[in-house]
Image: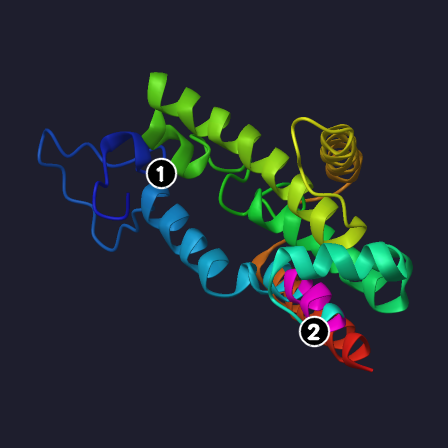
Amino acid sequence: GALSKSVMSVRMPFPDQVKGAAHLKTTKSFIEDISAKRSLRMITYGSFPLYLALFAPVTAAGSIFLSDIVAYQQANGPFLFTVSGAIAAIVFFIGYMIILNEYPFSIIKAKSDVIEGPYMEYAAKYRAVVYITRGFFMFVLGAIFSVLFIGVPPTILSWGILVNIVVALIFVFMMGIFSAFSPVFTNRQLLPTILGATLLGILSIILGLL
């Protein structure tokens, strides 16, 4: 995307290059280049809150194995209902919004971009695959939350799968409501928000160790 620099990505209106018109000191803006830089920012530090939230139940259970984490919650109650778990759940939701690039963290596909950033690159059937994959990703994140924070694994042949589906739907509804009333963060607003969520994630991990 950063290297394509197609005619569609040039800021409108742009100089008539076909006739060889000369425009000195003209600045060209390429949407692909902007989107690629935004994506790099989200990859480098945007996912920190989600990873920290996923690690908080590990510190509380004292094991990285999902079976141990589930067994710990079955013996001591859902991790969600602890102080560390409540903070980690908030951080998880923030990371959920960031990973899915939803408002107010949607700098990759901000509506100010004429072609929705990188999604134009996945046009037609490939764009459909992107959105289908996004739907599966939303369900997987909800199932992960069910396992790590409630202690209910996604077993298809048990009632637990219903809990996973309900949790996934709750996250979708919460995301929709939160996104509907949120502006798009600028880069100056995005970094402090992610930093604050990262610090909350570290706090939840420390509380889980106590």
**Quick one: quadrant of the N terminus?**
top left
Q: Position of residue 165 (x, y in %)?
A: 72, 29
Q: Is residue 112 above or below residue 41?
A: above
Magenta stretch encompasses residue 171: no
Q: Nearer the viewer, mark 2 or mark 1?
A: 2
- Where disc 1 sits, the SS reads loop
Residue at (45% x, 58% y) in the render: 43
**Quick one: quadrant of the C terminus?**
bottom right
Residue at (76% x, 62% y) in the render: 88
CA–CA distance in space, label 2 to label 1: 53 Å
* Residue under pointer 1: 11
10 Å crowding of disc 2: few (<14), some (14-19), many (20+): some
Q: Position of residue 5 (x, y in %)?
A: 23, 41
Q: Is residue 188 above or below residue 134?
A: below
10 Å crowding of disc 1: few (<14), some (14-19), many (20+): some
Asked whether residue 197 is in view, the answer is no
Magenta segment: 53-60
Numbered mark located on residue 114 in the image: none
Residue at (59% x, 62% y) in the render: 51
Asked whether residue 16 is in view, the answer is yes
* Residue under pointer 2: 62
Q: Position of residue 92 (x, y in %)?
A: 70, 55
Q: Is residue 210 above or below residue 92?
A: below
The majority secondary structure of the magenta stretch comes to helix
Question: Which is more N-terminal, label 1 or label 2?
Answer: 1
Q: Inspect the image, locate mark 2, and give the three-letter code of the amino acid beneath it.
A: Gly
- Where disc 2 sits, the SS reads loop
- Name, please, the residue furthest toward the top: 124
Horizontally, is 72 left or right of 55 in the view?
A: right
Q: Inspect the image, locate mark 1, and give the three-letter code of the amino acid beneath it.
A: Arg
